[in-house]
Image (cartoon, grey):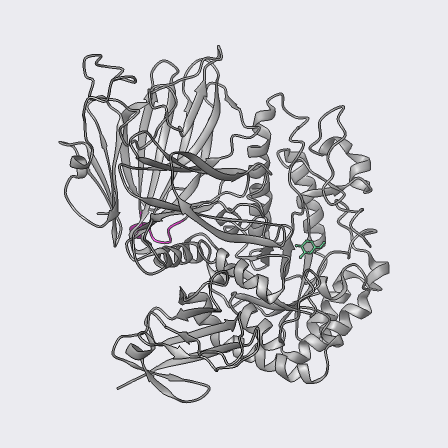
Amino acid sequence: MPIDFNSATKLIMLTTDTTTYQMKVDPYGYLIHLYYGARTSGDMSYLVTYADRSGMCGCPYDVHDRTYSLDVLPQEFPFQGSGDMRSPLLVVRDAEGAFGCDLRYVGHTISNGMFSLPGLPAVYSEEDDEAQSLSVQLRDERLGLEVELLYGVLPHFDVITRALIVTNAGNASVTVERLQSACLDFVHGDLDVMTFNGRHAMERRPDRHRIGHGSFSVGSRRGMSSNQYSPFMIVCDHAATEFNGRAWAMNYVYSGGFEAEVERDQYNQVRVQMGLSDDRFSYPLNPGERLVAPEVIMAYSHEGIGRISNIMHRCIRKRVCRGYWRDRRRPVLVNSWEAMHFNFNGDSLLDLAKTAADLGIELFVMDDGWFAERDNDICSLGDWRVNEKKLGRSLAELADQINDLGLKFGIWVEPEMISEDSDLYRAHPDWVLALPGKAPTLGRDQLVLDLSRVDVRDNLFEQLCGILDQAHIEYVKWDYNRCITDAYSRTTTDQGKVLYDYMIGVYDLLERLIKRYPKVLFEGCSAGGGRYDAGMMYYTPQIWTSDNTDADNRLTIQYGSSFGFPLSVMGAHVSACPNEINNRTVPLTTRGHVAMAGGSFGYELDLNELPGRAFDHIRRQISLYHEIENIVCEGELYRLSSPMDDDVCAWENVLEDGSEAIMTAVVLKVEGYAQANYVTLRGLTPGANYRELTTGVVYPANALMDMGMPLPVNTEMYASYLYRFERVEG
Ligand code: GLA
């Protein structure tokens, strides 16, 4: 069974195909973390050592026992007040303002299927017998505080997830001052931490360093998971590589502010944790109220960091992404933004659509600028009514004309925002997040609507349904272009709730819309990749990865994004050169190869500006993409080299059964009379032969995975190569 409880030893064991996770209830009722590693059996209690360690933080229930201190022991759910002075998962204050609680085991239940979380996205199971859930109940008698620790085990996906619910079952109010969802306590190890950092238009660049004493954290105080730091973290052996060594990962299923922290303590033990940001967070719970901590997906592998990525990819692709589009091929799209920005009308859109249809593009996306008076970015957000004058026709007519060309039709929206210059703002100035008496900070000239309010969400739902019902719209790009600076809601006196309640409100609005329009493909976006997280992926099975479409920068952005998130979600487009963000020129072939690394492929340029000969090239690009997209989306990814450190950036996608593979390589350094670059492949069937489909040459897999494949010598900067391999029978 995936979850097992030994009543004699009070050991709880979770098992996936290749991992084991253990915790145990100790004699005082505290939950001790024992193990998360390679699959094993037996009781790992022997890993925990008890010794006299000066007793500065002793045992609350036995003053004479100097060998017991929660400040030292590996814990499953460290909370403030236990004597553990490391970073806690939970901090609570009572009605008098006093800090501290004492949570001990009361009982547990095991059930089939994955747990779900009220109001929040979570990993789900399709069949009840593919997963089990564990609920461990802890209780603080003084406060009447109950904590339910939730664990979901999906054995064949090799993931364990954690979340928790804090309930005030007492008679007085309490306030939750810090709430993290998961931690892993390591009793020893020389470990590195990997985080993914960036900024607008340069997201998720990997960063790796050794975990030293003290604590190191990344996070977001922006009310969004952010362009700056990804809510995904890897901890690995200092010596671990893509293909070897132990690695653990945490992926937060939440799109708001977060914190991911590693801490090395006085005994060289390491605590890793992930959860809500403490920033502007202080959540009161009246008697009977509860607070849900979002889920964290955890993975472990002793086969290197690459394996961790593939575990995350499969779990998010199949058990976070949902609905009609989960397993469907995503249409190749053309988006009007980099082609026209705000300067379009119905006719120019149709001109672009005609060429797109001729080239084999399948979806036309009308980006920003189609509603109210929106001809620039300083007005009209909030007024979701079609600018028929600008389009020269109704939305239905435009959609029909585009459909008649053989294209699907989609639109851009940014519902969570409002412009001061909008009818909605003039009618409801109190609907924004803003502090009374303080001028709100503007971001892209806009304010954030208070989505913690149900009346605001109802208004947006009605406005959006009004648009989606009036035309044949099959795709919606859901944007979010600023962070939350002034987290003040007029509906509450507890402002420490607002950022969390805002996110719950966003999820509620999205859930209502995807229920009502189950076949509409929603693509997430947040100034590019500002909400590129597993929480959004529950609602939007594809996300615009970055506003930066330069193929060179994209290599790094997509490489970094691939550590935690599946390629099927990754929106990647071919755009014009010189690139509008960094002025770089890269060959069209390379732009195509780089964009094909994502499972949501498209174009974002004025196709009519291209020289005629580019058209055949694009037709061939699209047909190549159709031939490989299932390998990109469903295959295993091997990052063969790094765009940041190597002369060639190469990656490989291999179908799980090894029958087909593609390898793409982009040259990032050229020298006079250069030496050859060799790319060593991975994941092919040992002993088999593979035919490269363009040349027909047959290669032995063992040689490809040993000496590798030479790339053409003396090539140009940014030359790229895409090889397709098919296993040859016999
Ligand atoms: C954001 C998005 C872009 C585009 C613009 C439109 O920056 O990331 O792709 O949609 O908004 O205003």
Query: Which quarter is ligand 1 in?
Result: bottom right
Direction top: furthest residue: 96
Q: Is residue 119 visible?
A: no
Examine the rendered structure and indicate whether residue 90 appears above or below residue 381.
above
Q: How many numbered tags mark residues here?
A: 0
Direction front: furthest residue: 672
Image coords of residue 545 (percent x, y)? 57, 57
Direction right: furthest residue: 389
Examine the rendered structure and indicate whether residue 184 appears above or below residue 234.
above
- Examine the image and state in which quarter residue 432 appears: top right
Residue interval drawn in magenta: 124-131
Q: Residue at x 42, y 69 (%)?
A: 653
Q: Nearer the viewer, residue 467 or 165?
A: 165
Examine the rendered structure and indicate whether residue 55 appears above or below residue 446.
above
Left or right? Give the position of 25 relative to 92: left
- Locate the C terminus and report the quarter of the image it occupies: bottom left
Image coords of residue 715 (percent x, y)? 54, 80
Q: Is residue 486 visible?
A: yes
Left or right? Give the position of 627 relative to 389: left
Q: Residue at x 59, y 56 (%)?
A: 522
Q: Nearer the viewer, residue 346 or 454?
A: 346
Q: Residue at x 45, y 34 (%)?
A: 293
Examine the rendered structure and indicate whether residue 524 appears above or below residue 143.
below
Image coords of residue 616 (percent x, y)? 64, 84
Residue 292: in magenta span? no
The secondary structure that most of the magenta stretch takes on is: loop
Q: Nearer the viewer, residue 261 or 120?
A: 261
Q: Residue at x 13, y 31 (%)?
A: 8
Residue 127: in magenta span? yes
Image coords of residue 638 (percent x, y)? 39, 65
